[in-house]
Each structure stands twice: as structure tokens, then as C-alpha cells.
């Protein structure tokens, strides 16, 4: 059944190659391949501005919970249908728990090289455990041909075989996307992507001077430290035309106030920034000092209209720090600050508070010990003089 439907799709794509046989704008349709339990459908096009898509076709593939051999074979057959078409400007590929491999991703990258006019590319392959650095190298090589790409969205969350070397190969392809305006990259729950991976990614992102929106997700990365946010600072310092920034570092326990200070140094130069979203939930080493540094950098931005902060389970952020942040951002039109609901016991056990209390106790004990030693030596010297 699948092969017959793909053959029909091939015949329709060949008919669209002749300008005389192309349908009108109203009859233009979006090819939507939904491969769930071996079914294939074609849905209507929902773009509001049909004039933009007069000479284009929109492809969307959604592959849901199939086995490894089925995923690669279906993707290979779908790419053969894609190769027979022309003037494709939008391609959406979403695979969820399909265990697609580097071999299947290689077939997709070969077909992408033939569509140099592609403007919008979205590849979402979360929880595909067989994708490794080799698949990212294939994707990086294919991105070098897509110099007209304007919107890019890639999600490799849960692909635990990806390391910093694969991110480096991907960043080499990002350097060629000179027309890119929006980018979204997700490497959440990738434990082998460390600070070096973010540094490798920064080498490709900081050359995209036309970027207006950036979305980076490195949540649940237990080995990312403040050095990773230092690389993010270098990215933000180069991309001065950014209007929207979204950074997700949830459940990264090794990030401290030093990392937030690095981030604030990059944010204070974004004069055209209109919207910012920072998610640092469950980063338990953060305190009011780090939050204050970020808020102080945002006060200088006059075009800022929307702020969204997530600091759940950051018990070092107290109510006094929350009130200061709300007071400093009162001129912003839309402010959403999500902080932990704290009790007195939780505040006393917060890592930053515990560290400060321990330091004060050590200081007091040291002063008391020094005073006792001084008194003892004083009386010993008196007895010796007598």
C-alpha cells in the first residue's frame, strides 16, 4: 500500500514539473506524509499568503514509532519522491522514537543538496538513539549548499551518541548560511555534549550576522558548566541584530552565578532585543547575585517588550531578589517571572545560603580561635617575665 501511494506521489510531482500543467493557487496543496501504521496522507496547504508559495511546494513528513529497518526504508523511498520535484522551499521532517540511523539521514542529506532554493528546513529527530556524529557530519555538508536558507530548526534531544565533534561538523555547515534569520537548535538530554560542544557551535553561529532569532536548548546536560555560558556570551557579542533570544539550560547543576554574569555581558549589547526567555530551572547553585546581574543588563535595553524567566527549584533565589527583579523590570510591557515557592526551611537549606552560612561560621570560629591563642600567649609571656 505504501509503495502504490508513493508511486502516485511521484506521478503528481512529475506533472508539476511542466508549467502548463501546474494547478492554480487555490488548488495548490501541501504534501503531508504521515507515516503512522503504514498510512500515507496528503493534507491541504494552510499558508496565509499564497503568493509566496506560487512556485513552491511544501513537504512535511511525520514518522511515529516504527522500527529501525522500517524507518530507514520509508525515509529512503520518500527521498526518492523528493528528488523528482523542483522548487521546494519548505521541508519539515519529524521523527519521534523511530530509531532512524545515520544511513537514513545520509539519504535525506543527499536529496537536500539538490534543492538549493530551500528557504525553511525543520528536522526533528528526538529520541533517535542510533544517530551519531556521522549523521551530523552528513547534515553539515548538505547545509553548505543551502546558502539561501532563512529558517532552520534542528532537534536532536535524547540522541546520547552525539558528542562535541559532531557539533563541530554541524557548525562548519552553519557558516555557509549567510541569509539565515531564525535558528533553533536542541541538544537537550545529550550527556556527551559538554562545554566543548557549545564552544564548537559558537564558531559557526557567531558568523551569522543577519540572525534575528536564536533558540538554544541544552537542558539536562549534567557536564555543562559556566564555560558553556562563556561561549554563549561570545555568540551574543557578535550577533547584534538579534530581536529574540531563548536559552534553555534546565537541570544543569554545575552552572553558577559566574555563568549568569557571562550571559549578562553578552545581553547588554543587544540594542534591538524585543523578547527574551531564560530557563534555568533546577540549577541549584544560582542565587540572587546571578539574577541581579542579568536584570541589570536588561535595564539598558529600551526596545525590550517581553521577559520570561524560569528559575524553578533555584532555592538560592530568595523573595527579596524576586522583588528587586520585578521592580527593575516594571517598564517592560509583558513580564513573566517563575520562581520557586519557598518555605523558611527550604531557604535555610539552599546551596548558596548554606555556603554563605558555613563561610561565616568558619570566620567566626577562626577569630575566636585566634583570640584564645593570643590570650594564652599573653599570659605565658607574663609568667616567663616573672
Image (tube, rainbow, N blue to C red):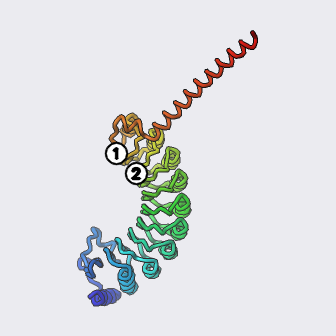
Task: Identify which residue is drawn at 28% across, 90% down.
Answer: 4
Judge from the rendering whether residue 40 lies leftward or rightward of residue 126; answer left or right.
left
* Residue, far right: 385
User: Could you say where residue 223 lies in the image, as x and y percent from the top left?
Assistant: 50, 56
Asked which secondary structure carries label 2, the reply is: strand
Q: From the viewer's perspective, is residue 362 above or below residue 337? A: above
Q: Residue beneath label 2, please?
A: 279
Judge from the rendering whether residue 236 lies leftward or rightward of residue 337; answer left or right.
right
Task: Identify which residue is drawn at 50% across, 76% down.
Answer: 138
Q: Which mark is residue 234?
A: none
User: Could you say where residue 214 lies in the image, as x and y percent from the top left?
Assistant: 44, 59
- Front residue of 93/235: it is 93
Q: From the viewer's perspective, is residue 74 above or below residue 200? A: below
Mark sitting earlier along the chain (2/1): 2
Q: From the viewer's perspective, is residue 49 above or below residue 367? A: below
**Res. 246 image quadrant:** bottom left
Residue 144 in view here: no
Q: Which mark is residue 338?
A: 1
Q: Could you classify mark 2 by the number of other residues whose Cα lies within 10 Å: few (under 14), some (14-19), or many (20 or more)?
A: many
Task: Identify which residue is drawn at 47% across, 49% down.
Answer: 271
Q: Are marks 2 and 1 in contact (CB under 8 Å)?
A: no
Q: Could you classify mark 1 by the number of other residues whose Cα lies within 10 Å: few (under 14), some (14-19), or many (20 or more)?
A: some
User: Could you say where residue 129 lies in the image, as x and y percent from the top left?
Assistant: 42, 71
Judge from the rendering whether residue 15 lies leftward or rightward of residue 246; answer left or right.
left
Asked which secondary structure carries label 1, the reply is: strand
User: Could you say where residue 286 lies in the image, as x and y percent from the top left?
Assistant: 46, 44
Cα separation between marks 2 and 1 = 9 Å
What is the quadrant of the C terminus in the image? top right
Amino acid at each position: 500500500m505504501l509503495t502504490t501511494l508513493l508511486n502516485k506521489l511521484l506521478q503528481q510531482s512529475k506533472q508539476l514539473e511542466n508549467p502548463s500543467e501546474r494547478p492554480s493557487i487555490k488548488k495548490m496543496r501541501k504534501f503531508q506524509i504521515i507515516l503512522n501504521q503504514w498510512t500515507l496522507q496528503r493534507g491541504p496547504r494552510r499558508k496565509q499568503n499564497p503568493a509566496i508559495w506560487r512556485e513552491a511546494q511544501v513537504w512535511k513528513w511525520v514518522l511515529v514509532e516504527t522500527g529501525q529497518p522500517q524507518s530507514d526504508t520509508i525515509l529512503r523511498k520518500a527521498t526518492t519522491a523528493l528528488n523528482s520535484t523542483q522548487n521546494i522551499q519548505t521541508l519539515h521532517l519529524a521523527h519521534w522514537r523511530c530509531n532512524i540511523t545515520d544511513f537514513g539521514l545520509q539519504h535525506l542529506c543527499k536529496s537536500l543538496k539538490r534543492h538549493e532554493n530551500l528557504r525553511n528546513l525543520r528536522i526533528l529527530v528526538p529520541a533517535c538513539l542510533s544517530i551519531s556524529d556521522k549523521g551530523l557530519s552528513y547534515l553539515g555538508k548538505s547545509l553548505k549548499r543551502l546558502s539561501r536558507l532563512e529558517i532552520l530548526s534542528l532537534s536532536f534531544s535524547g540522541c546520547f551518541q552525539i558528542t562535541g565533534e559532531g557539533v563541530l561538523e554541524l557548525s562548519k555547515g552553519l557558516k555557509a548560511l549567510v541569509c539565515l534569520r531564525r535558528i533553533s537548535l536542541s541538544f537537550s538530554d545529550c550527556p556527551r555534549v559538554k562545554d566543548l560542544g557549545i564552544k564548537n557551535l559558537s564558531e559557526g553561529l557567531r558568523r551569522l550576522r543577519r540572525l534575528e532569532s536564536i533558540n538554544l536548548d541544552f537542558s539536562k546536560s549534567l557536564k555543562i558548566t559556566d564555560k558553556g555560558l562563556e561561549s554563549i556570551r561570545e555568540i551574543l557579542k557578535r550577533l547584534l541584530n538579534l530581536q529574540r533570544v531563548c536559552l534553555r539550560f534546565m537541570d544543569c547543576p554545575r552552572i553558577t552565578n559566574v555563568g549568569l554574569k557571562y550571559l549578562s555581558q553578552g545581553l547588554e549589547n543587544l540594542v534591538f532585543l524585543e523578547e527574551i526567555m531564560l530557563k534555568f530551572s533546577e540549577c541549584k547553585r544560582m542565587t540572587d547575585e546571578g539574577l541581579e546581574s542579568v536584570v541589570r543588563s536588561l535595564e539598558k535595553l529600551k526596545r525590550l517588550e517581553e521577559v520570561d524567566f524560569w528559575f524553578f527549584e533555584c532555592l538560592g533565589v530568595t523573595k527579596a531578589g524576586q522583588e528587586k527583579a520585578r521592580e527593575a523590570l516594571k517598564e517592560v510591557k509583558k513580564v513573566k517571572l517563575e520562581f520557586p515557592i519557598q518555605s523558611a526551611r527550604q531557604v535555610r537549606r539552599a546551596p548558596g545560603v548554606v555556603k554563605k552560612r558555613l563561610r561565616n561560621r568558619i570566620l567566626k570560629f577562626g577569630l575566636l580561635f585566634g583570640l584564645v591563642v593570643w590570650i594564652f600567649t599573653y599570659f605565658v609571656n607574663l609568667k616567663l617575665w616573672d
